[in-house]
Amino acid sequence: MITVNHYIALSAVLFAIGVGGVLTRRNLIVIMMSVELMLNAANLLFIAFARHLGDMGGHVFVFMVMAVAAAEAAVGLAIALALFKNRGTVNTDEINILKG
Amino acid sequence: MELLMFNMFGAVAVGCSLLMITSKRPVNSALSLIAVMFALAGLFAMQDAHLIAALQVLVYAGAIMVLFLFVIMLLNLREKIGSESRRQPFAQILVVIVLSAAFAPLAALYDPTAAPVHKSIDQTFGTTAGVGRILFTEYLLPFEIASVLLLAALVGAVVLTKTRLR
């Protein structure tokens, strides 16, 4: 029998993988994909609790998270493109113009 | 049956997301993430979130990931030799295991019998009609604000990628 705890555990593992991707990768595009994975782990939790508590408010939250993720991807990828045009790289080790 | 489906989708989601963060080429990462999105859509459908499962495939796998693939194609990135050490995947798996060990026990903290469990949900739960009704009544203001957010993101993306601003 699947309980909501199974979904909490799966969501936690997916979130951990996303955090691991952000911490260990150097490619800006892959880092942004890891952020998308973390947002999806949160979405899974919203859906699991919406079903568990019988309240559709969680579905609306997932809808909003999707809208924010789309906006974030559009702006983030535009920044990555502009960065690549100016500096010729999207490696986060080589992008240190804010370093004092 | 439910357990089998959960294990299948969960294994695909975890396996493909591990592939995503370990693969060297960004295109492989993006394709793995698309597989994760599909597995998650299956899990959403198992939870009676039919509309969200469809939106997951349409919006995430269909639109957002295509955007990622377009940018990867435009940048035409090549991994520099020696820029990431050969031991990198081991370090990544180690980070993931440590973080999972930190996060996963959170599941044990929640007692599923604490709240009244709704075994019987009504007919419109998770359908377009059900979600649409509360989206346009209870959550009308956030919905309208989301449209402004998307417009701002649209204008921002155009401004950022324009080569010459006057």
Image (cartoon, rainbow, N blue to C red):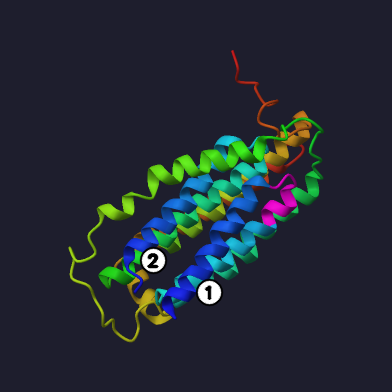
Which of the 4 image quadrants contains residue B14?
A: bottom right
Name the residue that disc number 2 marks: A47
Apparent side of residue B154 relative to residue B109 in the rendered image (left or right)? right
Q: What residue type is labelled 2?
A: Ile
Q: Can residue B137 be seen in this view?
A: no
Q: Where is residue B97 in the image (x, y as percent from the top left)?
A: 49, 44
Report the residue that reaches farthest toward the bottom: B123
Q: What residue type is labelled 1?
A: Ala
Q: Where is residue B37 in the image (x, y as percent from the top left)?
A: 57, 63
Q: Where is residue B75 in the image (x, y as percent from the top left)?
A: 79, 44
Closer to us: mark 2 or mark 1? 2
Apparent side of residue A43 relative to residue A82 in the rendered image (left or right)? left
**Whether residue B53 is situated above or below residue A65 in the rendered picture:** below
Which of the 4 image quadrants contains residue B70?
A: bottom right
Q: Can residue A32 be seen in this view?
A: yes
Q: Where is residue B147 in the image (x, y as percent from the top left)?
A: 48, 59
- Numbered circle sitting on residue A79: none
Q: How crowded is mark 2: few (under 14 residues within 10 Å), some or many (20 or more)?
A: many
- The C terminus of chain B: image quadrant: top right
**Whether residue B112 is situated above or below residue B154 in the rendered picture:** below
In what element is the residue under mark 2? helix
Question: Does the magenta-highlighted stretch encompass residue B24?
Answer: yes
Magenta-colored segment: predominant secondary structure = helix
Of the pair B137 and B29, the residue shown nearer to us? B29
- Numbered circle sitting on residue B54: 1
In what element is the residue under mark 1? helix
Q: Give the range drawn in magenta.
A: B23-30
Q: Residues within 10 Å of mark 1 (few under 14, many from 20)?
A: some
Callout 2: chain: A
